[in-house]
Amino acid sequence: MAADPTKKNDHPEPKINWDDSQMRSSYANVCNVTGTREEIVLLFGTHENWHADQKEVNVKLSERIILNPFAAKRMLLLLNRAVKQYEERIGPINIDTQPPEKLA
């Protein structure tokens, strides 16, 4: 029997079972990304410096996630979709990196 040309793949998508039995949760308010040809590295951490005029900010790194470029690109697409849905429900996210103006 010939394959249906309207179908992308004759094989059904596998069912994914998410095993969260060893999952940890961490909070991060800082993220940095570095990479090489073979991997993309995500560094997550927190800082508790609350004053915009500080000369130095200390970030306590807590997690390093290493992805291959294919997984990183899939993550990019998923994050773009999630942020778009968030902004449609809640409103735009302002990520202006300039420190807030000081009140006179």
Image: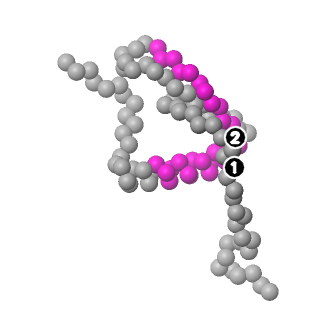
| Towards the viewer: 25 or 52 | 25
Q: Secondary structure at mark 1?
A: loop
Residue at x 36%, y 49% (from the top left corner): 90
Check contact, mark 1 vs mark 2: CB within 8 A: yes
Q: Which mark is residue 22?
A: 2
| Towards the viewer: 35 or 75 | 75
Q: Which mark is residue 50?
A: none
Left or right: 97 with respect to 79? Answer: left
Task: Assess disc 2: are there few (<14), some (14-19) or many (≥20) residues with their C-alpha within 10 Å of its C-alpha.
Answer: few
The quadrant the N terminus occupies is bottom right
The quadrant the C terminus occupies is top left
Left or right: 91 with respect to 34? Answer: left
Q: CA distance from mark 1 to mark 2?
A: 8 Å
Instruction: Provide residue 62's location: percent of width, then percent of height.
Output: 60, 27
Within the magenta stretch, is there residue 67?
yes
Q: Which residues are magenta?
A: 56-83
Q: Secondary structure at mark 2?
A: loop
Left or right: 42 with respect to 102? Answer: right
Residue at x 77%, y 84% (from the top left corner): 2
Q: Quadrant of residue 21?
A: top right
Up the image or down, 53 lies above or below 5; here it is above
Q: Amino acid at mark 2?
A: Gln
Q: Amino acid at mark 1?
A: Asp
Up the image or down, 34 lies above or below 14; here it is above
Instruction: Provide residue 16's location: percent of width, then percent of height.
Output: 69, 58
Instruction: Provide residue 36's location: percent of width, then percent of height.
Output: 69, 35
Task: Assess disc 1: are there few (<14), some (14-19) or many (≥20) residues with their C-alpha within 10 Å of its C-alpha.
Answer: few
Q: Which mark is residue 19?
A: 1
Residue at x 40%, y 30% (from the top left corner): 97
| Towards the viewer: 28 or 10 | 28
Within the magenta stretch, is there residue 28?
no
Question: In this rendering, does residue 79 appear at all?
Answer: yes
